[in-house]
Amino acid sequence: MEKALRILNAAAQTRSGLAGKLSRAGYAPQAVEAACNRVEAMGYVDDRAYAEAALERRQRQGRGLQVIGAELRHKGIDPELINELLGEVKTEDEVQRAAELAVKLLQRHQGEPAMRQREKVMSTLMRRGYPPWVARKAVEAAPALDS
């Protein structure tokens, strides 16, 4: 329990992440389970709050829902919770965020032919986790945002 609190004091963790760190530290599976149950009951570990904060933070950083979902799965968040949280994000909001990012990306490629700019921005948006149709809509909306 003491080790779990030290880990949580350093940084917020998911239940899965905390269990992994305690296991790697050499604690028995029963002790790991008991510590995780206790800190969760105390409110120190909350996968929903962790996932919501991560979703908001990564969206502000210009990441799309596909990348965010993959990151949350990697952190050990329950897939049903991930689907629920990602499902709450409005399509228009994601397109708007992608369009704002597209404006910034277009500035990096000024002076290049328009088709090349479009290709580079769309590929960057898709690498950041936006679906191709969102990237396309964002590039189409970007000049309107720029003026």
Image (cartoon, helix red, strand yellow):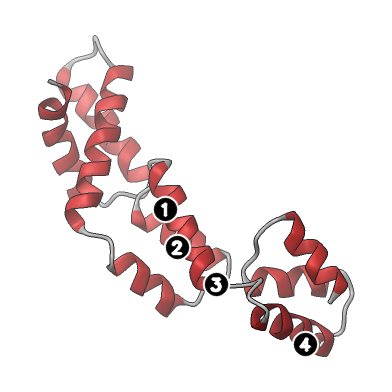
The residue type indicated by label 1 comes to Glu
User: Element under label 1?
Assistant: helix
Task: Check disc 1: other Cα within 10 Å, few if <14, some if 14-19, many if 20+.
Answer: few
Pointer 3 residue: 47
- Mark 3 vs 2: CB contact within 8 A: no
Pointer 1 residue: 56
Question: Would you identify the image quadrant in which residue 105 lies?
Answer: top left
Distance in Å between CA atoms under marks 3 and 4? 17 Å
Determine the residue positioned at 18% across, 39% down. Answer: 138
Instruction: Using the rendered image of the protein, determine whether residue 132 is visible from the camera's viewpoint.
Output: no
- Mark 4 vs 2: CB contact within 8 A: no
User: Element under label 2?
Assistant: helix
Determine the residue positioned at 75% across, 86% down. Answer: 33
Q: Position of residue 85 (x, y in %)?
A: 36, 68
Determine the residue positioned at 49% across, 77% down. Answer: 78
From this view, report whether residue 89 is shown above or below residue 22.
above
- Mark 1 vs 2: CB contact within 8 A: yes
Task: Check disc 3: other Cα within 10 Å, few if <14, some if 14-19, many if 20+.
Answer: many
Determine the residue positioned at 81% across, 90% down. Answer: 30
Q: Position of residue 68 (x, y in %)?
A: 43, 56
Distance in Å between CA atoms under marks 1 and 3? 14 Å
- Return the disc, 3 or 4, that comes first in the chain's sequence: 4
Relative depth, front residue between 47 and 122 = 47
The residue type indicated by label 2 comes to Glu
Q: Which mark is residue 34?
A: 4
- Mark 3 vs 4: CB contact within 8 A: no
Pointer 2 residue: 52
